[in-house]
Image: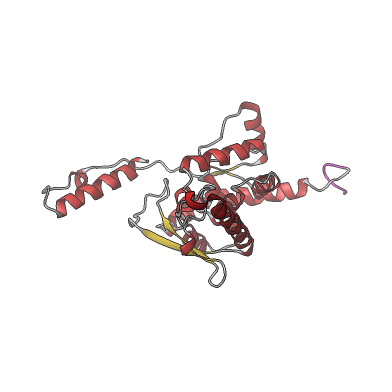
Amino acid sequence: MPLLGVHAVISSAMGTAKKKKLITVNPCDFLELPKAKKSRPLAWTAERVRRWQENRKRPARVMVWTPAHAGAFLDYAESTHERLFPLFHLVITRGLRRGEVASALWVDTDLDDAKTMSVLAGPDEEDEGPKTEKSVRTFSLDEANIALLRKWRAAQNADRLAAGENWVDSGLIFARPDGSAFRDEYLSERFAAVTKAARLPPIRFHDARHCAASFALAAGVDMKVVSATLGHSRYSFTADTYTSVVPEVAAAAAEATTAIIPRRSSLGAV
């Protein structure tokens, strides 16, 4: 957990103790925290991919795929019948955090009328803004994600029948075949394994969220809408984080689109 997150947890506990008059002063009120170093995302441009292939060194901790990379990942996951394909698709297109998607419940999801999902939001590791302890955010679901979730629900119903008395009635959308919760770490491990198998430049599971934001902004979605969808506590955080990476993503997407067109000359017909 980042230092700011540790401070928030301890400060909250101390604040509760002070209210209960177990202590007279909250010592956390007097701590001067260092300014968090922001990790702005970088896009996996063709040049950065080439250098990574040579030395296997990531240009930065936070990396973002281009739309072509994301498409290749999802195509590979679907073609290999990856069990978590619907989960990965949801994260890459709607920007859920790992803890949010791991704890998402069917009761908070409407696939038929409102076509929305509500999740218990947690703070971004890079976001310094205030976050309420139990903030819930609701976002819209597109038809592709709705279709995948319906298919997942049908498969889960089959798992329930097969498990019988051993079924764990967790209410979770994304659960193991017996209904129990996935380990958060397993989701990251599986994401990394599929990325490697698809021979794609590496990103963290959390970076898939950055992909969703970058793709939406590159497609022209309003910054405030993206900020609300991601559940950022500050609109300025969204703007500051993605201002530099969006042009790179858009440019890389344009290059990838042109590159797939076979030409007799690398410069094309003149």
Q: Residue at x 50, y 45 (%)?
A: 206
Quarter of the image for residue 125 reads: top left
Q: Is residue 147 visible?
A: yes
Q: Is residue 62 visible?
A: no
Q: Which residues are magenta?
A: 265-270
Residue 175 image position (x, y, % from top left):
51, 50
Judged left or right of residue 180, residue 85 is right
Q: Which residue sits furthest front? A: 165
Q: Is residue 195 inside the magenta stretch?
A: no
Closest to the observer, 70 or 37: 70
Residue 173 image position (x, y, % from top left):
51, 56
Q: Is residue 269 inside the magenta stretch?
A: yes
Closest to the observer, 189 or 10: 189
Magenta residues, dominant SS class:
loop
| Relative to 157, residue 200 above or below | above
Residue 172 image position (x, y, % from top left):
48, 55
* Total numbered labels: 0
**Colouring scheme applied when the structure was drawn:** secondary structure
Q: Residue at x 51, y 40 (%)?
A: 186
Residue 99 image position (x, y, % from top left):
45, 49
Q: Which residue sits furthest top? A: 55
Closest to the observer, 142 or 253: 142
The quadrant of the image that shows the N terminus is top left
Closest to the observer, 14 or 54: 14
